[in-house]
């Protein structure tokens, strides 16, 4: 795969019905499921636990190393790196000065930034689709 073909980011969004009542723990779990981080085989809810620690660190405007996370969660550094890389590709987490942290100053601002990324991706998709339609003499009603 060439550099042009490799994905810069990977967004996965699942339509899962939100919970009817506010519960920060369950809401964070819902968010992780909606973003495809919690899969049935992940019995320890590792991504949820990592994101929770990153949220707590964000409160103090700090990041955490993969070793910090591994120690706090009693998991291997390799497991941390796997989940953190997935979160980086999804646009939620950044690696900065040796630590991992939320991309924004809060979870809401992080999600807003990812939303802007997705909008840019769709704008590119629209432009390319329009170009392809013209090449094939296809026209939509709109």
Image: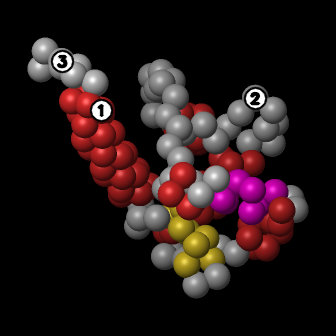
Pick out the residue farthest to the left. 142
99 relative position to 113: left or right: right
The reply to whether the C-beta atoms of the residues labelled 3 and 2 are less than 8 Å apart is no
Label 3 and label 2: CA atoms lie apart by 40 Å
Residue 70 marker? none
133 and 59: which one is in front?
A: 133
Q: Secondary structure at mark 1?
A: helix
The one of 17 and 15 positioned closer to us in this rendering: 15
Residue at horizontal 81%, vertical 32%? 41
Residue hosting label 1: 132
Q: In the image, 102: left or right of 78?
A: left
Q: Is residue 44 magenta?
A: no
Tell whether 111 sits left or right of 97. Answer: left
Indicate how the structure is coloured in the image. Answer: secondary structure
Instruction: For marks 3 and 1, give the CA distance.
Output: 12 Å
Residues 82 and 128: in front is 128
Q: Is residue 118 above or below residue 102?
A: above
Could you tell whether 104 is left or right of 58 in the image? Answer: left
**Coordinates of residue 125 in the picture (x, y in percent):** 33, 39
The quarter of the displayed image where residue 6 is located: bottom right
Which comes sooner in the sequence, label 3 or label 1? Answer: 1
Residue 140: give x, y in percent of width and height: 18, 18
Q: Which residues are magenta?
A: 79-85
What is the secondary structure assignment of the residue under circle 2?
loop
Q: Element type at marker 3?
A: loop
- Name the quarter where the C terminus is drawn: top left
Which residue extends farthest top? 141
Marks 1 and 2, how far apart at CA: 39 Å
> Please, what is the dominant secondary structure of the magenta stretch?
helix
Q: Is residue 20 above or below residue 31?
A: above
């Amino acid at each position: 795969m060439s550099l042009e073909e490799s994905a810069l980011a990977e967004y996965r969004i699942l339509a899962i019905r939100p919970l009817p009542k506010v519960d920060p723990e369950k809401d964070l779990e819902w968010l992780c499921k909606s973003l495809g981080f919690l899969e049935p085989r992940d019995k320890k809810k590792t991504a949820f636990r990592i994101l929770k620690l990153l949220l707590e660190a964000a409160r103090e405007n700090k990041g955490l190393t993969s070793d910090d996370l591994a120690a706090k969660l009693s998991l291997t550094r390799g497991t941390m790196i796997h989940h953190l890389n997935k979160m980086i590709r999804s646009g939620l987490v950044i690696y900065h000065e040796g630590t991992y942290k939320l991309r924004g100053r809060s979870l809401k601002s992080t999600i807003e930034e990812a939303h802007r990324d997705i909008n840019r991706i769709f704008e590119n998709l629209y432009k390319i689709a329009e170009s392809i339609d013209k090449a094939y003499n296809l026209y939509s009603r709109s």
